[in-house]
Image (cartoon, grey):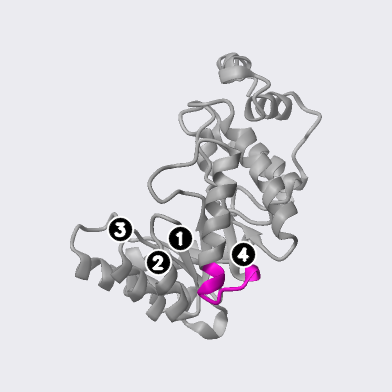
Amino acid sequence: QKAATAYVEYMARKQQESGAAYLDLNVDEFSTDVPEREKVMRWAAAIVQKASSLPLSIDSSNMSILEAGLAACDKSRGKPMVNSVSLERLEALEVAKRHGAVVLAGATGAQSMPCNVAERLANLRVLMGHIGKAGIRPAEVFFDPLVFPVSVDPSNGPYVIDAIKALRREYGAEVHFAPGLSNISFGMPNRKLLNQVFARLCREAGMDGAIANPLHINGKILDELDVAGEQYKLARAFLVAEDQFGMEYITASREGRV
């Protein structure tokens, strides 16, 4: 347990030093026993808050574990976050309301995943109605337009980029973003490069935050990307669907150019 505690403390400090705004906690994989996971969530929250001054983002598919994590949050460091609320889990919105939390608002529909930009926007508009009724302000909302791999569908990159642009136009500067960026590169070589280039493209579209490892993705790293270099151009072409199914990118990877 000492080694586990030391590792969690180290990671919390490193994440804060690298520019994290929230530290996300998820213990769902620890056990199938809910009371045991609630106990571990409380333990993790205590350890992380001892090592870092950042507010926590509590992430779980189980409402009682969300409750346990939020109850363990030190509210003096800022409002905690619920990761996440969506039309398929509106009960998480009630949990967020009870604990005065901000919310990560996902574009999932009540019964299915969105297939394009229009469906993402439609789902989030309905969700924003529920969020407003719960008394949560737009400034306390972090949109997740849902990132799916470009290896599955070349349009998955443009869908997210275009959704960010549209949401920023519709809701203005108050709202925030926190998509799970690394999903974009699943199954592809040199995922770090793809994730960083995608993060920069999303930032250019209006994204101001993400679910990401700040050791690999932060403002300084994105600013220093060589946009004129071959690696960036190959990754960008794949991510914006100019390189269909990434054939040029994959070829370059096999040749050691990325």
Q: CA distance from mark 3 to mark 2?
A: 16 Å
Q: Which mark is residue 17?
A: 4
Residue drawn at x 57%, y 70% as measured from the top left? 132
Residue drawn at x 71%, y 55% as measured from the top left? 170
Q: Position of residue 184 (x, y in %)?
A: 54, 37
Judged left or right of residue 196, residue 172 is: right
Reply above or below: 206 against 34. above
Query: Which residue does the numbered mark 3 point to in the structure image?
Result: 28
Q: Position of residue 86 (x, y in %)?
A: 45, 57
**Frontmost residue, 121 versus 219:** 121
Q: Foreground mark, 1 or 3?
A: 1
Q: Amino acid at mark 4?
A: Glu
Residue drawn at x 55%, y 77% as measured from the top left? 135
The residue lying furthest to the right in this view is 228
- Check contact, mark 4 vs mark 3: CB within 8 A: no
The residue lying furthest to the left in this view is 33
Q: Is residue 132 magenta?
A: yes
Q: Foreground mark, 4 or 2?
A: 2
Q: Is residue 128 magenta?
A: no
Q: Amino acid at mark 1?
A: Ser
Query: Which residue does the numbered mark 1 point to in the structure image?
Result: 84
Q: Earlier in the sequence, mark 4 or mark 1?
A: 4
Q: CA distance from mark 4 to mark 1?
A: 25 Å
